[in-house]
Amino acid sequence: MDSENTNYNEVIHNKLKKCEFCGKELEPMGLDYLYANISPDCIQYQRCTCNKANQYWKEKDKLDFEEQKRRKYRNIINRIYKENYVGRKFQEQNFENFYVDSNNEYAVKVASDYISKSIDKKQVNGLIITGKSGVGKTHLAAAIANKLIENDKIVLMGRLTTLLDMIRETFRDNTKSENELIDLYSNVDMIIIDDLGTEKISSWALEKLYTIIQNRCENGLPIIITTRFDKEGLIERFSQSQDEQLVDAIISKLYQMCYGITLKNIKEKAETNNVNIDGAKIIDPQTSPDYEKYANLLYELRKHKGMTIEQAKEITLNPVYFGMLMVKDEETIADGLVSGAAHSTADTLRPALQILKTAPDTKLVSAFFVMVVPDCEYGSNGTFIFGDAGLNANPNPEELSEIAISSSKSFKQLVGKEPKVAMLSYSTMGSAKSELTQKVIDATKLLKEKEPDLKADGELQLDAAIIPEVAKSKAPESTVAGEANVLIFPDLDAGNIGYKLVQRLAKAEAYGPLCQGIAKPVNDLSRGCSYQDIAGVIAITAVQAQK
């Protein structure tokens, strides 16, 4: 019996873990661990009660609690973003696609500095971003949000109505707690309230807003506000609630917590640069009398895809979507749309395809450049169309033939001369054979079957396509070789490299990427475009709109 007790004690002693602070042996949680043939690392122990251990566990429990709370915050915010268009939309907005010019570059610099200080926790003040509609307030705020998220910060962004509606839902949904939401809004790393002052706000809503602002102030946490109103304008808007004392408290606290930056609108920028735009008609989606009409139009167009009227109203505030709806509406004076200087290609083409659709008898939307080469005897007095140099990455033979057909029509419309289409390759008329050359050969065959009257040939090397002397040697039987003015590249790599080489080395004017295959004229600019590029593409769009 004594021997058995000795063995039992040895087992216990060998498996027991000691406190790393005081050396005391720790009690295992459950005797079954002692008899199990398991690793000692798998045994759980009671906590030591020494002072250093108590302090360690106190700090660890606090960190674990904070991490659990952050995971809970992220889950709630993700749900909000899934249910709210603004939340989904702002994820696509960043500093890279924010249009910067001399009028807003200071604001962008302030925003960038703000991010750096916020990440390093040297910044507890907030921001109030002011400016009229359409100047990029939401975009700049979203860019800040996304940078903070990249650095593991928890950020909530939305309109005040969205935040308050979540609280109101707690009255109908027992699974949610108003206190939990207030706690979330009060404690996330950053909260961004977009377009403050546009809502009709009740005394109840003002009280909740004040609670959130006050809690964040006490917690030393920042807040970002975007608004089209100045301080006096916000007071006037909120005073409609009849609770002037509470309004004064909210606005005072906001301006105590935040410093401001201002973005200018088109008219303000024009005045700053002494440019007269009195003849221009500027439309603000939020104040346009056609806003409701276009929101309903978008809803009718997209309801079969699950779009709600609320989502349609939110999306219609986007200038690109609003513009597309103007073009769609036969009663308006809008015949085409130019975008891209401050938006990505995807943000331009997505609403175009959703609202305008493809042109009749067109199977593929593609992009092309109008290239005007100075002092050039090739092409049409130095004028060419390059396709596709901006959209379709690796078109198959069928797609390549469609690009050629659309590009020939674009050349005829814009230049007014007969198109001569060269299907480009690194081979001329079978001089080399590979999968790459075969694709161009197949595309050329399809093209000739579809458009037998179109002057087109391939496969052709570039020199054989545009230089008569080379054409006589390499493709003497071709009716296009040496005279081509429409150049169809086998893929986007070749097209993009080709147009940029000609633009930079030959000092050519490059207009595009221009779109073809959409039911109405829509063209996409590069975000690095100059004002001359914008003017040129607008002129081309006007020509495309002519019936």
Image: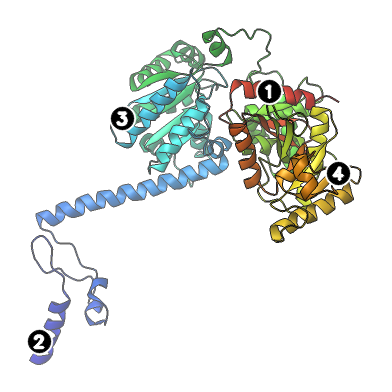
User: Residue 216 versus residue 315: which sits nearer the camera?
Assistant: 315
Residue farthest along the right direction in this orientation: 453
Which residue bears the numbered disc 2? 6
Q: Is residue 276 above or below residue 531?
A: above
Callout 1 touching callout 4 (CB < 8 Å):
no
Mark 4–mark 3 distance (CA, rounded to whole Å): 69 Å
Image quarter in which the C terminus is found: top right
Question: Residue 235 location, x and y as percent?
Answer: 46, 13
Label 4 or label 3, whichever lies nearer to me, is 4
Q: Is residue 364 visible?
A: no
User: Residue 471 versus residue 126: which sits nearer the camera?
Assistant: 471
Mark 1–mark 4 distance (CA, rounded to whole Å): 32 Å
Which residue bears the numbered disc 1? 536
Q: Earlier in the sequence, mark 2 or mark 1?
A: 2
Mark 3–mark 1 distance (CA, rounded to whole Å): 44 Å
Q: Earlier in the sequence, mark 3 or mark 1?
A: 3
